[in-house]
C-alpha cells in the first residue's frame, strides 16, 4: 500500500486517455457492477452480463475507451498489491439532478458489525473514479476546511430536524434532513475553490469522515458514463455480497433485464 500512502486527499492521475473517442450516447440510465478479481482488459473477454448491459444502455463503441481505462486501473491496483475490487460503470441520461451540488465524503465501504479483530478496518481507504463520457467529478480544493464545514452543517441540520422514527428504508424524515444539509452545504461552500476532474480523466481520492475528499457529481444536462472502482480484499468483498444475499464473485446490471454472472466468465 506504500504507493498510495503519499498521495493527497485527491489527485488527478497521469492517465493517457485517447482523445479520439468514438461518438457515445446513452440509451437509458443503467449501471453494471462487478465484484471480484480484476477484470480482463480485453473487451471480448468481459462477462456476458456486461455486454448485455452495454448493448441495452449505450449507443456506440465502448471497446477502445473502456479497455484503455481497465488496463490503467488494473496496473494501478496491481502496483498497490490489490487483486480484487468492486467496479461499477454507470450510464446516465442528462438531467438537472445535480444543478445543486451534493457535497459529501464517501463512507468507508467495508464496515462490518462485530469483533474488530475478526473484521479489521480495511487498509484501502480510497478509490478511483473516471468518466468515459460527460463532465468529471467536482472536488473542493481544501478538503480539510470542507470536511469541517460538512460536519458542522450536518450537525446543525440534524439538531434542527423533527424527531421521528424511521418507518421504511427510504425514510421521508431522513430524506428531508439530507436535502436540507445538501442545500446548506452548497451555500456554505459556494465561495471555496473547486477543482473539476477533466472529461475522460481518472482521479484518485480518499474516503471516510477524517480523510475523505469532499466531492459532488457535476451538473450534467447531457449523457454521462462514469466508472467507480473500490479496492477490497476477497474476504471484504465476500462479506459485502453475503450481506446482500449474493455469492462472490458476481457481475450484474441494474436498469436493464437482470443479468447475473458467477465469476468473470463471458
Image (cartoon, rainbow, N blue to C red):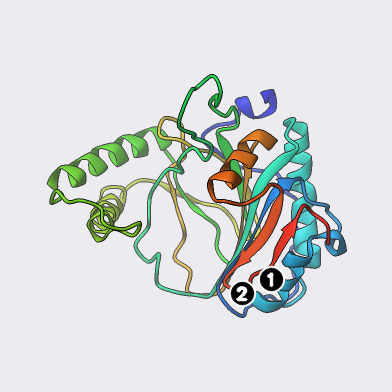
The residue to which callout 1 is attached is: 53
- Location of the N terminus (image quadrant): top right
- Residue at point 68% right, 23% down? 2
Q: Secondary structure at mark 2?
A: loop
Image position, residue 170 (x, y; %): 33, 60
Q: Residues within 10 Å of mark 1 (few under 14, many from 20)?
A: many
Image position, residue 84 (x, y; %): 72, 40
Foreground residue among 45 and 143: 45
- Residue at point 53% right, 45% down? 243
The residue to which callout 2 is attached is: 256
All told, the count of numbered labels is 2
Of callouts 1 and 2, the N-terminal one? 1
Question: Which residue is outermost to the front?
Answer: 245
Foreground residue among 20 and 30: 30
Q: Secondary structure at mark 1?
A: helix
> In the displayed structure, would residue 157 be above or below residue 234?
below
Image position, residue 216 (x, y; %): 44, 53
Q: Gap between marks 1 and 2, in whole Å?
A: 7 Å
Residue 17's disc is: none
Q: Is residue 85 left or right of residue 125?
A: right
- Residue at point 24% right, 53% down? 177
Q: Are marks 1 and 2 in contact (CB under 8 Å)?
A: yes
- Location of the C terminus (image quadrant): bottom right
Image position, residue 162 (x, y; %): 13, 51
| Residue 160, visible in the rendered structure | yes
Q: Residues within 10 Å of mark 2 (few under 14, many from 20)?
A: some
| Residue 18, visible in the rendered structure | no
> In the displayed structure, would residue 253 be above or below residue 86?
below
> In the displayed structure, would residue 11 be above or below residue 99?
above
- Residue at point 62% right, 52% down? 246
Foreground residue among 52 and 116: 116
Amino acid at each position: 500500500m506504500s504507493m498510495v500512502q503519499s498521495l493527497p486527499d485527491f489527485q488527478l492521475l497521469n492517465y493517457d486517455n485517447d482523445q479520439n473517442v468514438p461518438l457515445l450516447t446513452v440509451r437509458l440510465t443503467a449501471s453494471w457492477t462487478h465484484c471480484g478479481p480484476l477484470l480482463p482488459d480485453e473487451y471480448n473477454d468481459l462477462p456476458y452480463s456486461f455486454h448485455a448491459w452495454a448493448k441495452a444502455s449505450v449507443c456506440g463503441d465502448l471497446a477502445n475507451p473502456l479497455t484503455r481505462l481497465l488496463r490503467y486501473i488494473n496496473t494501478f491496483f496491481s502496483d498497490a498489491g490489490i487483486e480484487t475490487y468492486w467496479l461499477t460503470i454507470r450510464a446516465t441520461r442528462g438531467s438537472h439532478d445535480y444543478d445543486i451540488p451534493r457535497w459529501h465524503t464517501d463512507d468507508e465501504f467495508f464496515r462490518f458489525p462485530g469483533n474488530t479483530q475478526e473484521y479489521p478496518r480495511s487498509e484501502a481507504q480510497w478509490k478511483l473514479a473516471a468518466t468515459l463520457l460527460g463532465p468529471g467529478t467536482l472536488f473542493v480544493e481544501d478538503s480539510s476546511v470542507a470536511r469541517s464545514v460538512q460536519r458542522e452543517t450536518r450537525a446543525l441540520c440534524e439538531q434542527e430536524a423533527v424527531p421521528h422514527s424511521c418507518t421504511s428504508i427510504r425514510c421521508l424524515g431522513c430524506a428531508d434532513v439530507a436535502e436540507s444539509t445538501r442545500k446548506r452545504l452548497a451555500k456554505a461552500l459556494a465561495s471555496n475553490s473547486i477543482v473539476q476532474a477533466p472529461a475522460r480523466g481518472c482521479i484518485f481520492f480518499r474516503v471516510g469522515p477524517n480523510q475523505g475528499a469532499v466531492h459532488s457529481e457535476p451538473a450534467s444536462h447531457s449523457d454521462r458514463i462514469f466508472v467507480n472502482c473500490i479496492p477490497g480484499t476477497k474476504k471484504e468483498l465476500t462479506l459485502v455480497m453475503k450481506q446482500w444475499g449474493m455469492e462472490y464473485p458476481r457481475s450484474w446490471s441494474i436498469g436493464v433485464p437482470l443479468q447475473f454472472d458467477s465469476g468473470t466468465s463471458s
